[in-house]
Amino acid sequence: SVIIFPFLGVLAGITTWLLLGRMGSPLAQMKSALLNHQFIPYLQPLVEGDNYAVIGAEALMRWQHPKVGMIPPDQFIPLAEQSGLIVPMTQMMMKQVSNYFAPRASQLPIGFHFSFNISASHCTDMGLLEDCKAFLAAFFDHPVLLVLELTERELICPNEITTRLFRELHKLGVLLAIDDFGTGHSSLSYVQQFEIDALKIDQSFIAKIGTDALSAHIVDNVIDLAKRLNLNIVAEGIETRKQAEYLRAFKLDYLQGYLFGRPQPMSEFAKQWLNQINP
Ligand code: C2E
Ligand code: CA
Ligand code: CA
Ligand code: CA
């Protein structure tokens, strides 16, 4: 069972793996971590493309392990997906975010977005609709926008359940975004079928900005393609002023990246960004 623990490439990953290896099967550990509320959301700000005002946050999961420390998602999401644990883990993340922010919702700017990453395997589960309803209901007196990010790396194959799920989510006002745009193969028909609202240009393209002429051409082309689909566009992984300046000409809707803010615990996010909104 030690062998199945996620596919680690980096040294930090190997250290985690060694430590966890002595503490029972990875799956058993994840189950107990779930019961012990060790999966927590970190929030990264989303800013408006024209004035860099904070208008939303993406929830990124962390495993706060009592012995190992903070474990990044790459190291446990694959096993969570294979085992189905991703469903209750995501539910708990949404619950934690609404529990923390609904009582502070008056401090959020109008039209604030909360976005969550949703695995393909989760999209065959009508329970997701109930979780979204509960999330939005918690903000009944200060409504927020709820965004679900679906990665282009594993596109959902449309079947009866997913089609109904997405139709109902749409009616509820939940927005759908394609994450990691440009790395996979989302087609125009996919975008139309699931009534996608936004595209998040993969950070690998943003990282190419300012490297060489060919790379600039690739970035321009991906943005062009996204623009032709006529959806809201988010650029993520912006680390430098140079990248932000380059993107200005494209008048993108939203930006995200370390330049604007790193993922941080909810209380720190609130301290840093909400006071600024409502001092
Ligand atoms: P993602 O959804 O594409 O999230 C963006 C990743 O890039 C995050 O890594 C974020 O911390 C990082 N990032 C943000 N800005 C910058 C930047 O300026 N430079 C660089 N180099 N990186 C930046 P993180 O938090 O390690 O998450 C990795 C991936 O794990 C996510 O990629 C997502 O696919 C997955 N993930 C995270 N949380 C969840 C979750 O709750 N559910 C599911 N299903 N997947 C999740
Ligand atoms: Ca994402
Ligand atoms: Ca992404
Ligand atoms: Ca990614």
Image (spheres, rainbow, N blue to C red):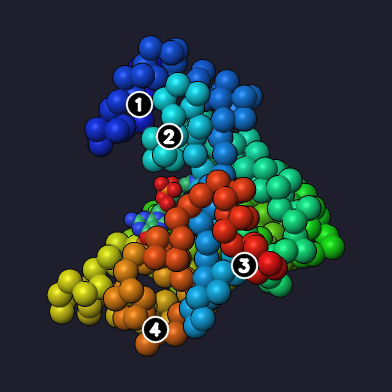
Mark 4 — residue? 248
Q: Tell me residue 78's x, y (percent).
A: 42, 36
Question: 80 or 44, which is in the foreground?
Answer: 44
Dividing the picture into quadrants, the one containing residue 41 is: top right
On the picture, is 8 further left or further right than 273?
A: left
Query: Three-letter amino acid code at disc 4?
Result: Arg
Dividing the picture into quadrants, the one containing residue 147 is: bottom right
On the picture, is 245 further left or further right than 102?
A: left
In space, the residues marked 1 and 4 are separated at their CA atoms by 40 Å
Placement of the C terminus among the 4 image quadrants? bottom right
Choose the circle earlier in sequence order: 2 or 4.
Answer: 2
Mark 3 — residue? 276
On the picture, is 215 further left or further right than 270?
A: left
Q: Tell me residue 138's x, y (percent).
A: 79, 53
Is residue 193 something that shows in the picture?
no
Q: Give the label, 4 or 3, closer to the camera.
A: 3
Mark 1 — residue? 16
| Secondary structure under the numbered disc 3 in the rendered image | helix
Disc 1 vs disc 4: Cβ atoms closer than 8 Å? no
Outermost residue on the right side: it is 141
